[in-house]
Image: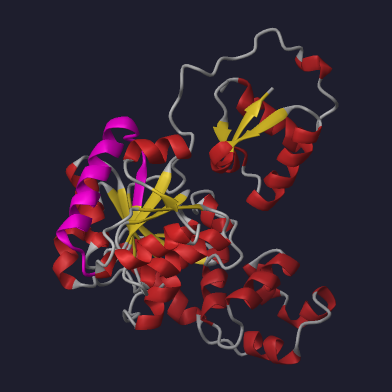
Amino acid sequence: MNEELLYTMALTRLPGIGLIGAHRLIEAVGSATTIFREVSNLKDIVPDISNKVIEIIQKHDVLRLCEAEIRFAEKNNITCLTINDENYPSRLRECDDAPLLLFYKGTANLNNLHVINLVGTRHATDYGKDICQRFIKELCEIMPDTLIISGLAYGIDINAHKAALQYGMDTVGVLAHGLDRIYPSVHRRTAADMLSHGGLITEYPSGTNPDRQNFIKRNRIIAGMSDATIVVESAEKGGSLITANIAESYNRDCFAFPGRIGDEYSIGCNNLIRNNSAILLQSAEELVKAMNWKETSSIHSHEGIQRQLFPELSPEENQIKTQLENIPEGMHINTLVVNTNIPINKITAILFEMEMKGMVRAMAGGMYKLL
């Protein structure tokens, strides 16, 4: 049995540690395995750790439950992804409150080059349903490799998943409970179809109930896994607005479809646009252009640049230069993060330094181009 998986799972189940505390422990010690194996020496490794935390770890009795959970996952073809696993969503990994462990069942590449989420009210109107259908149909025509994320909930979520399946696009549902059930149960058939054309993912182990607070917490996963959050319909208050706010806090792009003045389920979207918290969106083509995903013939490579004239580069700068050299139209920062495995907070600083050296140019929509 994978020890790091076992001990990471155990760390998530210890009372009184918390997600941020667990993150800090792993960062300080190096791995979950070391935390448990060297618990008697943790004071030497982490001098400011409290005796209470050490006592909690020493008296843990969750390993048996975690071993059973791993066996359940193996039996049901569920992949357990610790935060340092290669297949863990790299965009999500860079968020401070990323789950230490995810349970995933499906076929989609969670580190796809293009990932968006569609969210909105559970009381979708015909207008909102039509937007999902038209938008995803158009997106499939111009950017068919895009991964569609949503929450498998009533309304906009399930319509986004169904439209993605209809047009042959991968779609992943982020759940607020364990993978031993589907909630709401009426979406079971769609969820089953998604397993071969996307998948289901959650931070919750089997047996977890779909409690209200879980839905709020899972919104950060929806936002964190994606390049952009798209709000289709929303009332003045709602979970999709929480997702939009989280996306903004992660420095991710946020878009909203406008609605008619006075429509109850357009107020939230119109407010996001009015407050400059979201970019007004009317089509998939507008999204692709805003994200600079679509190649344009107007951008040409500058031949004859003498690369040897670049100043001496660090290993990370060399990685970025190599990625950009053969892409004259530029590359999105999230793609650079995926391809180089350099954390988003670090790559931002490196790109700034490269700009100052006259090596790269920052363009709209988070794109970078080698000069």
* Viewer-proximal residue among 38 and 43: 43
Classify 44 as above or below 229: below
Q: Residue 322: where, in percent of width, then height?
A: 66, 26
Residue at image location 44% in from the left, 34% down from the top: 289
Residue 335 position (above or below residue 272):
above
Residue at the image position 80 percent from the left and 76 percent from the top: 46
Q: Is residue 192 visible?
A: no
In-image side of 172 versus 196 (left or right): right
The boundaries of the magenta stretch are 122-148
Looking at the picture, tell me which residue is in the foreground, 362 or 42: 362
* Place of residue 365 in the rendered image (x, y in percent of width and height, measured from the top left): 54, 40
**Residue 137 location, quadrant:** top left
Q: Is residue 224 visible to us here? A: yes
Question: Is 123 one of the magenta-colored residues?
Answer: yes
Locate residue 223 relative to residue 250 in the image: left or right: left
Among the 4 quarters of the image, the one containing residue 188: bottom left
User: Residue 299 in the image: x percent, y percent?
Assistant: 54, 19
Give the residue at x 81% y 73%.
45
Q: Quadrant of the C terminus?
A: top right
